[in-house]
Image: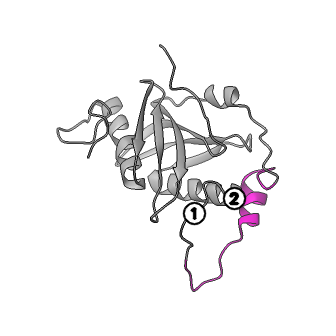
């Protein structure tokens, strides 16, 4: 395999390792360079919350819109202390090479969110098992790309689904 798409390339690059598929849900792990801790992920909802917290904690990419709430908000420093040593210092403690050695039983993805604009995310995702990278314009497109890859692995692909082979167009 060429592996030309296998790189992190950004301070906020994340590796998603998918280990099991369930009823409309997956179980896996998430890794980033600022912690050696394995973040367990059960489903796309938890993945999105963990990614958002991570981006907020390193302040990259900077969110173009702020969250509004009538309740007291959890401080970013709380997340830093609970979830990852050294994020507040912005010191990488895992190299890109170490991160790229992490693999899921069913699929492995490199997620690089380049911008957080219009209350969504824009970036690119690499499906390491296929060495393919597709740009996404929204969180929804990223979710559909992950789902499409997992459907192919699970043999549940349906016609009309967003696909890696068609360039990810919706």
Residue 155 screen position, x and y as percent: 28, 30
- Tell me: 53 left or right of 80: left
Look at the picture and state if 129 lies above or below 156: above
Quadrant of the rendered structure where residue 96 is?
A: top right
Which callout, 1 or 2, points at the residue further toward the start of the chain?
2
Position of residue 83 measured from the top left corner of the image (x, y, whole percent): 72, 54
Q: Which residue ends up furthest to the left in the rendered image?
A: 159
Question: In the shown orientation, is residue 5 left or right of residue 168?
Answer: right
The boundaries of the magenta stretch are: 68-88
The mark found on residue 63 in the picture is: 1
Q: Which mark is residue 57?
A: 2
Image quarter of residue 21: top left
Residue nearest the viewer, comparing 62 with 47: 62
Q: Is residue 24 above or below residue 10?
A: below
Classify residue 158 as left or right of residue 153: left
| Residue 116 position in % (x across, y down) | 52, 58
Which residue: 65% across, 76% down? 73
Q: How is the image coloured?
A: one colour
Q: Which residue: 52% across, 31% down?
A: 104
Residue at image coords 37%, 36%: 150
């Amino acid at each position: 395999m060429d592996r030309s798409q296998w790189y992190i390339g950004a301070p906020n690059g994340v590796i998603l390792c998918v280990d099991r598929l369930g009823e409309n849900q997956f179980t896996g792990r998430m890794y980033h360079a600022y912690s050696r801790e394995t973040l367990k992920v059960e489903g796309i909802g938890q993945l999105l919350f963990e990614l958002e917290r991570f981006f907020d904690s390193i302040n990259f990419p900077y969110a173009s819109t702020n969250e509004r709430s009538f309740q007291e908000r959890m401080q970013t420093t709380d997340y830093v202390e609970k979830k990852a040593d050294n994020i507040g210092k912005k010191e990488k403690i895992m190299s890109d090479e170490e991160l790229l050695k992490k693999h899921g039983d069913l699929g492995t993805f490199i997620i690089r969110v380049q911008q957080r604009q219009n209350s969504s995310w824009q970036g690119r995702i690499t499906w390491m098992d296929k060495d393919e990278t597709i740009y996404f314009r929204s969180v929804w497109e990223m979710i559909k790309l992950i789902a499409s890859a997992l459907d192919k692995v699970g043999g549940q692909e349906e016609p009309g689904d967003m696909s890696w082979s068609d360039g990810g167009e919706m």
